[in-house]
Image (cartoon, helix red, strand yellow):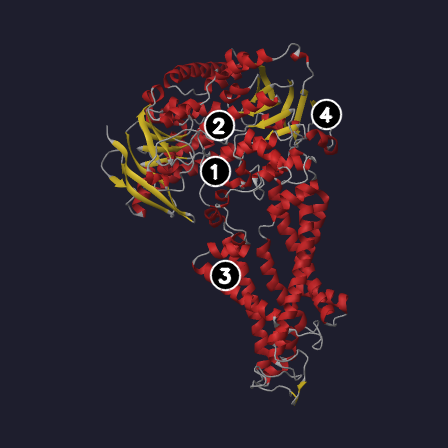
Amino acid sequence: MTNVVDIRDLAVTFATDSGPVKAVDGVSFAVREGEVLAVVGESGSGKTVTAKTILGLLPETATLRGAVVLSSRDGTTEGDVVQVSGSRLRELRGRDAAMVFQEPSTALNPVFPVGWQIAEGLRAHGKLSRKEIRTKVLDVMRRVGIPDPESRINHYPHQFSGGQKQRIVIAQALVLNPGVIVADEPTTALDVTVQAEILDLLRRCRDEFGAAIVLITHNMGVVADLADRVAVMYQGKIVEHADVKTLFSSPKDPYTQQLLAAVPRIGEGLARAHERAARRPEGWSDQKPVVEAKDLRITYPGRFRQPDFVAVDGVDLAIRPGEVLGLVGESGSGKTTIGRAMAGLTRVSGGSLRVLDVEMHGVRERQFRPTRRRIGFVFQDPATSFNPLLTIAQCVAEPLVVHGLAENANDARVKVNELLEAVQLPAAFGNRYPHELSGGQRQRASLARAIALDPELLIADEPTSALDVSVQARVLDLFDELHRELGFAALFISHDLAVVDMLADRIAVLHRGLLVEEGTGDEVLGSPREPYTQRLLASLPVPDPVEQAQRRTQWEALREADERSAAAR
Amino acid sequence: MSQTPAEDLAPHRSRWQRLPIVSHLRISVGVQHGMLVVGLVLTGIFLLTALFAPLLAPYGFSQLRDDSGMFGAQQPPSSEHWLGTTQGGLDVLSRLIWGSRTALYVIVVAVAASIVIGVILGLISGYFGGWLDRTLIVIADAIYSFPSLLLAIVLAIVISGGQSDMWGGIFAAALSITVIFIPQYLRVTRAEVVRVKAEAFVESARVIGASNLRIMTKHVLRNATRTLPLILTLNASEAILTLAGLGFLGFGIEPTAAAEWGYDLNKSLSDVTSGIWWTSVFPGAAIVLVVLGLTLVGESLNDLADPRLRKRAAGAEPVEDLGVELPRTDEGAQTPREGTL
């Protein structure tokens, strides 16, 4: 076995206005032919910088030290990416190493047909006739699983779904048959069922095409599913390097241990849910629900001469006081739309939605405004949900000021400090501006703002999906703690079943605007009735390579059953 | 609890250093820095001259005689009259210095009026949208389609009958310029407001229950004024050109009311052919230099508004506290990436 990539003592420093920043510091690893090496770490750990170095894609502000040796597949040539000239580097790119990007919708040029884009690499490396190029492109498209490539070769990126676009990006990388594919978070932007398909395809890249893969990811489930060896990065250094089974069964470094412990696993939250259910007084289930939706329909007006887009189609659900309802679904399932409708940010177009005794169908902003103080909202992206020109204290004080509980932000400072303390932030952080806080700190401040008025209903729209896994664990713990203390009812929206499982009393599964299944965590996750829920559960990779291998066979069986039933129809 | 620990203030740059032009001066390098410095120097000279005109000018702007008698018309530069005298027997240097004051008045009035009206209209138009927005945009486009000088002449006639005293003339010139500028401020503010309106923090203010007025003033407006310093400087130079143009065409201010470069240029037209250069070159150069200075400042601000530069100025990402104690080397502790763990 030869090494296709050999990184020796690599250090990358970026020149910034506030002085040099060391992003990668003394990293060494090698990738052997036909092997999947996962580089895991949280944002800022230097994993993406390391990956980009393999293709020489760093900006001019970066200074490199060390060596990144790329060997061609036949082992005849090798080149050090750090040293080689521009033209030699272009030769290496695509032929020896190729890249799969995170966001398939931005990695493809929208004005060219996909076939042309796949062929771009072929045109850049050697002279082939049009016919040869077309044959090669068709072949690679078929092999990455695009049905009917003869007609789809001339289609444009927007005519493909997200998962298919990622297949095309992978085809682009595979067409020159490179020795190594660098996949930078290849499934992060995708839904969990699509993720399972792409992981399957990447596995085939290794098995059928014989390509080595450097997989950059923060998702430990993906690592367990695909990787042969794992390198854990933290603050620019590799803290642990082991084969996948050893790493998951006996992590040595304290950081790795902590990282693995933070990964949410299905089943962990059941105990908490049982505990909560036991604490509830009798007659609780007969109480009047805080939120009640009956045959809720939300549509977005269609463009000229097109039918309206139905985002939510006849959903019934209820949230009783003090209860956490987890709303799970893939992108486009309408889960965020339901949350926004409850907060009065989206109009209800049909059916009935009662929030704290206000009928949201046809409600006027003026009527709803007094109710707003009884609702808290936590947004998905903590980076944009704070006014960048106000300090954290001013932002958290905003609800108090708006509802007349304080004259101005200074007046509310005592209360604000209490709130910051409740979310485990030092009171001095109140004087900072949002960009001076990290993502997790910002999201905690966001929670502080949401609970400022002691709301009866809290709506959390994917509050942890923008956060790293260890930070996510802390925010989720905090949410649980606040819920225990304050006893609000909550709608917790997430695409991640494991996250919802940690917090929710009941779970509702949405699929294309329809409520597929609803019940307690035991019912939905323990013994799902609907095939969609089953597929969703099976697609979710678990952070344990042995268990994941079993689940994969289960998932493959489910997929085959699906295909058979589709064929029968 | 409201006082700040000293260490927490440390990451803030002082308010003075975060002011638009000062911060730009700090982050600019190379040619951009040079452009900005030249622009600032020219603009500074212009402002100082305008402020201290009574002290700097040897004579008044309408003074025809001193103790030793009449100045005499079209006198070449001499020790009494450094830049000579005009056809009407006025001192060119004094007219030049007093003229900067008139120019400054016009800029201040024109820009202040157009910025207030334009920003308010842009804010309302962008925030509420709908028919009001469409109407305002159509009107703005209609004003765009007029030649601006023609519009200014029409307004100058409407406001002051074409000729008037100093403040009448200044307001006539300034308000006619205002009408041309309002659409620019409206458009720029509206575009920014539409962008900011879609941000999550505006939605979060709505969810809290803040009123429209509060959202507009506190959350949207302050985030939408980023590009205003830029068009402000560019418009200031345009205001001077329009004022000079009005004066040159004879719709300016009477020489007895105030000094005005465009008027002087107009009167020096006949001198040019008879070899009397000093009456036209100096007012012309003054207009060119002031416009150049303001434009250089504006263009530099435009270049420096590049997002990549702004991002670099913002510094490193804050470090996430993971709640776990990790071994670390002394060397690593000094890099900005490491922080409190």
Q: Earlier in the sequence, mark 2 or mark 1?
A: 1
**Callout 1: helix, strand or loop?**
helix
Number of numbered discs overlaid on the protein picture: 4
**Callout 4: helix, strand or loop?**
strand
Question: Amino acid type of disc 3?
Answer: Leu
| In this rendering, the label closer to the viewer, 4 or 1 | 4
**Callout 3: helix, strand or loop?**
helix
Report the quarter where the C terminus of chain B lies: top left
Give the distance between the C-alpha atoms of the residues marked 2 and 4, in whole angstroms: 33 Å
Tag of residue B36: 3
At label 3, counting other C-alpha atoms closer than 10 Å, the crowd grade (few under 14, some 14-19, many 20 or more) is: many
- Residue at image mark 4: A358
Image coords of residue A537 (percent x, y): 48, 17
- Residue at image mark 2: A472
What residue sits 69% from the left and 58% below the top?
B113
| Res A189 seen here | yes
Contact flag, marks 2 and 1 (Cβ < 8 Å): no
Check the image and report above or below for A519 versus B338. above
**Callout 2: helix, strand or loop?**
helix
Question: Amino acid type of disc 2?
Answer: Gln
- Residue at image mark 1: A106
Give the distance between the C-alpha atoms of the residues marked 2 and 1, in whole angstroms: 27 Å
Contact flag, marks 2 and 3 (Cβ < 8 Å): no
| In this rendering, the label closer to the viewer, 2 or 4 | 2
